[in-house]
Image (cartoon, helix red, strand yellow):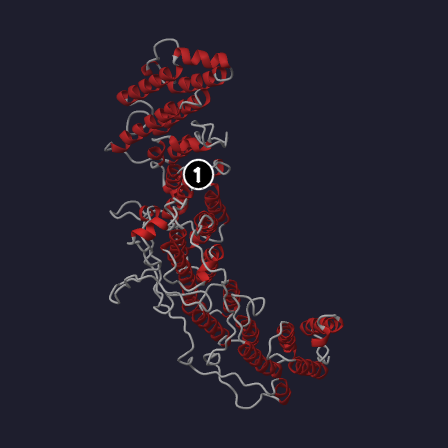
């Protein structure tokens, strides 16, 4: 067959087996040495084998032999012949994708002709298995160099134009098996172009979503395989999740290309359903976050201001007390002390004022329940260059400024109230003054995807998880809020003159930087607000989740440093209200105590980002003591609540909170000693609480001996 005319199919019934044996032997003997390869190229062995297979197929179809009820060659034999030819091409011509593509195309055309026949009854199980085996032949575990344009690279299969055509002939479940094998083959390969991402995710679609439901009464799709308890399903989704970590553009500094990869991937992943999204979207979110930090460094680290500004830049720490006390919604204030012992601890201090609704001057978190769950298709995400419009920031919060700084925005036309959507980021202001434009230095940042656009993309990505995984979504919102706040803080740190109130001496670039800082602060506020909306809508029914989420809220608010005073007070007040409305009293006590740190931030009064409200700290601790005393009436094992509150008292006392005096610490120590003596509880919880208590006393005694702290701590009696 190699050196002469291909044998005729009609000469005997064993010609297909003879051809298979001949092709296999030629691949083994000819492909094992350089001389063999030279001979195969000289005689054009592939074309001869291809002509032989075509002749056999045509002869069988014409004579109707082969045992097929429809006449002609059985389908599985047709696939076997093409599989054998494909193995030959892959073994002997590994660098020639054209030959492999011809093999796949020949098989796809043969199946298409058979499918179009009126007597076609579909593929049987044997044919499906043969086709599945054929599709796995090009998947190689060779070189992981994505630049290798052949099948030695596992990603080379994506360069085969006819591969998807042949893959579409398989049932959905068998396509899922082929996709899994492909992901295992490319697990260590770098994905360096958007086109590769597009082709790869198109091939592995059966792993990304359930089978589509036919609209014309076709075959009913198999049941969904998205079972979170199924080990095979978890392994498949783990393979899909790893892909985003292999996105490596040809130019490592091309952040735009990497964003396009993420946008393409999200277009396929967003239709996976609740069980798949929790696996596949999380790596995407954590892949975008480092990209934001890279773009942030490129965008802001290069900003330089050439206009001299005053060297006397100072920001006064916010230590002023609000006119109204903290209002904790839903908790009533007792008019008399719960017990004489608690009365002694809190003697001489105003009680916490608690009402059903906050007072009119208390900042509220004004958010709406508008969720951006519906995400645009990948085409829009990949070309997302318009300014974000998905925001619900009220008018007072849109002009968020640095602490104690009044920022005068440039003359920009405000959106009309009747507009349907408010801009999450106001459109960048065009400089109409030619003089200012001439004085502005040219920025070296030339990327299309800025931090703002990446944040909007990230916000929409997280929103996809909200209907199915609210707690996870809430935490991701808070993490993103911290990242946005970091961008605002970086803008201020690199441009300290922004602490000043803009005036006529500021050029257009300074005003633009001030506006960027406000944009990121407003976005951070909006993300926290969305987290609060999710808490009220989805988390309120789960007491355990509530405690975890409130802890995350407190951590986020302590980390963010660029909120304006009114915005920050509104957020911390709302968080304290959530803590005071927890179902279980011990949880209330712990969370209200934790919230006290929101009113005493920063390293000291000189810290420009500090918020100090000593009176509110004491009110939170008072409220915790009253709740702890109530808990002690029901069980003596709640002694640990008093010990934890004492720990916080000592913390604030050491940091010179002016309203936390030694009398409070001494009185609480006496109260704990009294409870320990009366309870005589030897349970594990009580033993741990007493060990914690002894450590606190030991710490206080150590401070009494310290040279710098002895004067302050010596007044504490323990």
Tell me the quarter of the picture where residue 643 sits. Answer: bottom right
**Residue lying farthest right?**
705
On the question of residue 308 being in view, the answer is yes
On the question of residue 473 being in view, the answer is no
* Residue 365 picture location, percent across and down: 41, 71
> Is 659 situated left or right of 254 in this image?
right
Q: Nearer the viewer, residue 130 or 227?
A: 227
Q: Nearer the viewer, residue 392 or 567?
A: 567
Placement of the C terminus among the 4 image quadrants: bottom right
| Badge 1: residue crowd in 10 Å (few <14, some 14–19, many ≥20) | some
Give the residue number, with chain letter if any, for mark 1: 249
Placement of the N terminus among the 4 image quadrants: top left
Who's the residue at 46% across and 32% down the image?
146
- Looking at the rendered structure, the number of numbered marks drawn on it comes to 1
51, above or below 111, in the image: above
**Residue lying farthest top?**
4
* Residue 624 picture location, percent across and down: 57, 78
Q: Nearer the viewer, residue 315 or 706?
A: 315
> Is 663 situated left or right of 407 in this image?
right
* Residue 87 picture location, percent across and down: 43, 24
* Residue 184 picture location, percent across and down: 49, 38
Helix, strand or loop at label 1? It is loop
> Is 436 situated left or right of 658 in this image?
left
86, above or below 190, in the image: above
351, above or below 60, in the image: below
């Amino acid at each position: 067959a190699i050196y002469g005319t291909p044998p005729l199919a009609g000469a005997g019934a064993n010609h297909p087996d003879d051809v298979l044996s001949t092709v296999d032997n030629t691949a083994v003997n000819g492909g094992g040495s350089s001389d063999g390869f030279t001979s195969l190229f000289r005689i054009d062995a592939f074309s001869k084998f291809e002509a032989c297979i075509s002749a056999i197929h045509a002869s069988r179809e014409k004579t109707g032999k082969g045992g097929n009820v429809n006449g002609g060659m059985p389908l599985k034999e047709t696939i076997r012949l093409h599989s054998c030819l494909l193995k030959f091409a892959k073994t002997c011509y590994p660098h020639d994708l054209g030959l492999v593509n011809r093999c796949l195309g020949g098989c796809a055309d043969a199946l298409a002709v058979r499918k179009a026949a009126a007597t076609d009854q579909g593929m049987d199980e044997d044919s499906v298995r043969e086709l599945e085996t054929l599709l796995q032949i090009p998947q190689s575990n060779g070189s992981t160099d994505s630049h290798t344009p052949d099948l030695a690279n596992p990603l080379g299969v994506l360069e085969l134009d006819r591969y998807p055509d042949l893959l579409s002939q398989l049932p959905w479940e068998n396509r899922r098996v082929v996709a899994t094998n492909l992901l295992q083959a490319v697990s260590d390969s770098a994905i360096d172009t958007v086109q590769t991402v597009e082709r790869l995710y198109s091939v592995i679609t059966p792993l990304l979503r359930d089978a589509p439901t036919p609209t014309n009464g076709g075959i009913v799709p198999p049941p969904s395989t998205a079972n979170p308890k199924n080990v095979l399903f978890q392994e498949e989704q783990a393979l899909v999740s790893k892909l985003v970590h292999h996105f490596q553009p040809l130019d490592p500094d091309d952040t735009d290309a990497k964003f396009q990869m993420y946008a393409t991937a999200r277009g396929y992943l967003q239709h996976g359903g609740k069980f798949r999204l929790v696996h596949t979207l999380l790596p995407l979110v954590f892949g975008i976050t480092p990209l934001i930090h890279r773009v942030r460094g490129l965008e802001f680290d290069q900003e330089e201001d050439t206009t001299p500004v005053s060297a006397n830049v100072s920001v006064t720490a916010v230590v002023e007390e609000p006119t109204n006390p903290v209002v904790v919604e839903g908790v009533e204030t007792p008019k008399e002390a719960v017990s004489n012992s608690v009365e002694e601890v809190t003697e001489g201090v105003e009680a916490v004022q608690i009402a059903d609704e906050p007072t009119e001057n208390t900042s509220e978190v004004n958010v709406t329940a508008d969720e951006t769950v519906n995400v645009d298709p990948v085409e829009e995400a990949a070309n997302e260059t318009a300014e974000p419009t998905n925001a619900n920031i009220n008018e007072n919060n849109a002009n968020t400024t640095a602490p104690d700084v009044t920022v005068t925005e440039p003359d920009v036309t405000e959106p009309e109230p009747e507009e349907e959507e408010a801009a999450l980021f106001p459109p960048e202001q065009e400089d109409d003054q030619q003089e200012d434009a001439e004085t502005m230095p040219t920025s070296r940042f030339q990327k299309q995807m800025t931090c703002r656009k990446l944040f909007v993309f990230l916000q929409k990505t997280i929103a996809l998880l909200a209907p199915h995984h609210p707690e996870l979504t809430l935490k991701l919102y808070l993490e993103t809020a911290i990242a946005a706040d970091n961008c605002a803080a970086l803008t201020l740190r690199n441009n300290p003159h922004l602490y000043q109130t803009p005036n006529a001496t500021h050029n257009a670039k300074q005003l633009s930087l001030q506006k960027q800082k406000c944009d990121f602060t407003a976005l951070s506020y909006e993300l926290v607000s969305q987290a609060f909306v999710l808490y009220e809508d989805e988390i309120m029914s789960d007491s355990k989740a509530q405690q975890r989420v409130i802890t995350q809220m407190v951590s986020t608010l302590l980390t963010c440093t660029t909120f304006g005073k009114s915005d920050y007070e509104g957020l911390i007040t709302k968080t304290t209200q959530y803590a005071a409305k927890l179902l279980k009293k011990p949880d209330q006590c712990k969370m209200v105590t934790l919230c006290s740190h929101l009113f005493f931030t920063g390293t000291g009064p000189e810290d420009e980002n500090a918020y100090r409200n000593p009176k509110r700290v004491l009110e939170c601790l008072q409220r915790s003591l009253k709740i702890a005393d109530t808990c002690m009436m029901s069980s003596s094992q709640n002694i640990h609540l008093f010990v934890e509150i004492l720990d916080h008292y000592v913390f604030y006392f050491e940091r010179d909170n002016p309203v936390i005096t030694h009398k409070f610490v001494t009185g609480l120590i006496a109260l704990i000693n009294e409870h320990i003596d009366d309870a005589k509880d030897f349970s594990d919880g009580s033993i741990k609480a007493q060990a914690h208590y002894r450590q606190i006393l030991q710490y206080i005694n150590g401070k009494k001996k310290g040279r710098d702290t002895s004067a302050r701590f010596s007044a504490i009696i323990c």
